[in-house]
């Protein structure tokens, strides 16, 4: 009987682990052109988030300290969200996606700072940015950036 319960619990543990490692992908786009197009349609700015999801400790902490908060969820509705991941584990994203992300990294994040927020207008012009995270749980500057550019 206990083996039967274990068999049913394994998929639950796997799905929980997968969800823990990703940003809410229902809101985040991964293609720059799609994000700009959607921003034009909805007359919203684009929030570009550069992360190293599997190697950047501040990026991982930012997920918990900012992205999982009600304040972020509310403010993020004013933006088209673009998630640019540059993982070290090449199996996490496709080669095509990695090439796309590296191209955007060289265009929009030349210093290769992680984590980095960039705010773009509907034409792709940079309006504002915020780089880094001190991992102290204080996300006021991130929320202020979003409030200021909505």
Image: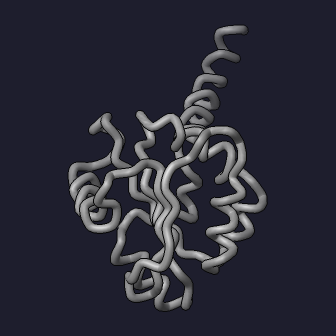
- Percent across and percent down for residue 41 are 50, 91
Quarter of the picture holding the N terminus: top right
Picture colour scheme: one colour
Residue at image point 58% right, 75% down:
79
Residue 1 appears left or right of 58: right
Residue that lies at the very extreme toward the right in this rendered image:
70
Above or below residue 64? Residue 50 is below
Residue at image point 34% right, 47% down:
86
Residue that lies at the very extreme toward the top in this rendered image:
2
Residue 97 appears left or right of 76: left
Above or below residue 64? Residue 80 is below
- Percent across and percent down for residue 89 are 31, 34
> Along the line of sight, which residue is nearer the eye, 105 or 70?
105
- Percent across and percent down for residue 43 are 55, 91
> Along the line of sight, which residue is nearer the eye, 109 or 48?
109
Above or below residue 116? Residue 61 is above
Residue at image point 69% right, 63% down:
143
Residue at image point 31% right, 36% down:
88
Quarter of the picture holding the C terminus: bottom right
> Along the line of sight, which residue is nearer the eye, 85 or 3?
85
Residue 7 appears left or right of 73: left
- Percent across and percent down for residue 132 are 51, 49
Residue 34 appears left or right of 79: left
Q: How many marks?
A: 0
């Amino acid at each position: 009987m206990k083996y039967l319960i274990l068999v049913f619990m394994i998929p639950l543990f796997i799905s929980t682990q997968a969800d823990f490692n990703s940003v809410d992908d229902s809101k985040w786009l991964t293609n720059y052109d799609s994000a700009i197009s959607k921003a034009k349609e909805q007359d919203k700015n684009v929030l570009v988030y550069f992360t190293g999801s599997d190697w950047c400790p501040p990026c991982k902490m930012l997920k918990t300290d900012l992205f999982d908060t009600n304040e972020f969820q509310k403010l993020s509705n004013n933006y088209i969200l673009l998630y640019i991941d540059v993982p070290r584990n090449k199996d996490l994203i496709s080669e095509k996606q990695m090439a796309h992300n590296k191209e955007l990294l060289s265009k929009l994040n030349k210093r290769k700072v992680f984590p980095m927020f960039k705010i773009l207008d509907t034409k792709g012009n940079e309006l504002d940015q915020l780089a880094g995270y001190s991992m102290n749980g204080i996300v006021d500057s991130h929320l202020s950036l979003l409030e200021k550019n909505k």
